[in-house]
Amino acid sequence: MSESQTLSHGGVAQLLERFRELRIVVVGDVMLDEYFLGTVERASPEAPVPVVKVSGESCGLGGAANVGSVAAALGSRVELWGIVGEDSAGKRFLAECEDAGIDARNVVEVADRPTTRKLRILAQHQQVVRLDWEDSRPVDESVGTAVVERLRSSQPADAIVISDYSKGLLSPTVLEGVIAVGRQWGVPILVDPKSADFSRYKGATLIKPNLHELEAVIGRKLSEDLEADLAEVSTSLLEAAEVDALVVTLGEKGMGVFSRQAKPLFVPTSVRDVYDVSGAGDTVIAALALSLAAGAALGDAVQVANEAAGIAVGKSGVAVVEPRELAARFAPGGADKILSREELIQRVAWWRMQDQRIVLTNGCFDLLHVGHVHLLREAAQQGDVLIVAINSDDSVRRLKGGNRPLISADERAALLAALKYVDSVVVFDEDTPRELLGEVRPDVLAKGADYREDQVVGRRLIADWGGSVVLIPLVPDRSTSGLLERIRSMDPS
């Protein structure tokens, strides 16, 4: 497993696109998370407790199922393996899986056992109390054996996540069987542990404890020199557990990354505003699994997971992270509007991940005038992002003659970039924008209404990917050619 500490903008774009092609198996303890939301305005006259006036309620997926929710929201296909009770909470849980786009056909309903359920009561966005329904005793051995056998006979996935919440499913036999399947498939196997005995996860690719869980494993508090102490204990833990890597989440101190192949890496937290830390660990393990399955180096995968966790804790309750939100954390700066062709393609990838509607217009834009400004302003209204593609000087000369352009491409690009309606300017050297259109694939191609649609270069390309051509009415008697004629006709005296 290779290690990297830098992740290029282009690399992230490719990684997030790859997520959509992945199929992830999540095995572990699943839960139903419920929330009652309200306000506290007085204490109860019956007992010294607050009275919560309920204003709303919500229901979601917890435990291993939340790992699946995060992975599904990031674009991958998810198969969930676990157990629920034969009760109403179990039925609600399966319905929530369907709504989240998770394949829960391998979640087994077990008689005489409640669905693990957590009900949180919040007032002014703070937890007042949590109510739990659960049975943490080990499930019958036959149930665990059936889970492993069904997994073994299924189609190989791109990664396996084992989410251990110590709720009874993941016995040593089940863990050994699931890890063996993952090794047979040759895919990353990631474990979110609850046990203080890491040898239970022998053979996995990566274990992701939090600081408290790690201290439980080593039987003591880590010293104030946290980085040095972690680096020291990680070596023995990696050897004892026979895993390739250890990623320790350290709360506000970020993450520590330890592997057999590289020096320890410490990644500072990317948290901006902490609203609710529920489910942050699930977000980390899901993002790690997807990134590694997509071919990222461990250090790069940790960067992605760190940013995903930073987004998750800024939301109320157990919340998923959208690809556009994660893309925004890595998006290149937009201050420079004048881009090379390669830079533009990268920028377009980011805009797409943020669900931006992309508009492109093209032309010489020689001797910028009010007609151009009107065209660009109206073109910008057709979407979220406006790209202006301008002909190079050589291209203009071929199209307009040897006495054009009047203004060089660098100056034309600078003038266009100064307009607030314009998000990006690119220069192309071909006589038509056909090739550039195929690279950018805009949602809208905007042209002036002096063209008929059947005269617009690239109209068929645009239609091929579901885009549209928009013809914008021109300002009367405003054109570069007209201005030049007026200048030439002026009396030089």
Image: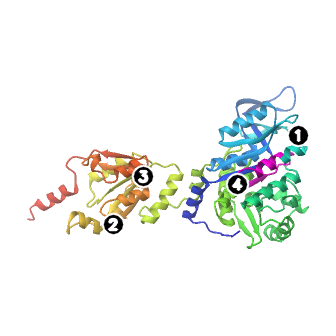
Nearer the observer, 35 or 237: 237
**Residue span colored magenta:** 146-169
Helix, strand or loop at label 3? It is loop
Q: Which residue is mark 3?
A: 442
**Residue 310, x across and y down, in percent:** 67, 54
Give neighbour class at mark 2: few <14, some 14-19, many 20+ (Cα, 10 Å).
some
Q: CA distance from mark 3 to mark 4?
A: 36 Å
Choose between 112 and 268: the one closer to the eye.
Answer: 112
- Along the horizontal axis of the image, is 132 left or right of 413? right
Element marked by disc 2: loop
Give the amino acid type for the residue marked by disc 1 in the picture.
Answer: Asp
In the rendered structure, the answer to whether residue 364 lies left or right of residue 84 reads left
Element at label 1: loop
Disc number for residue 429: 2
Q: Amino acid at mark 4?
A: Pro
Element at label 4: loop
Which amino acid type corresponds to the residue marked 3 in the rendered image?
Pro
Mark 3 or 4, nearer chain start: 4
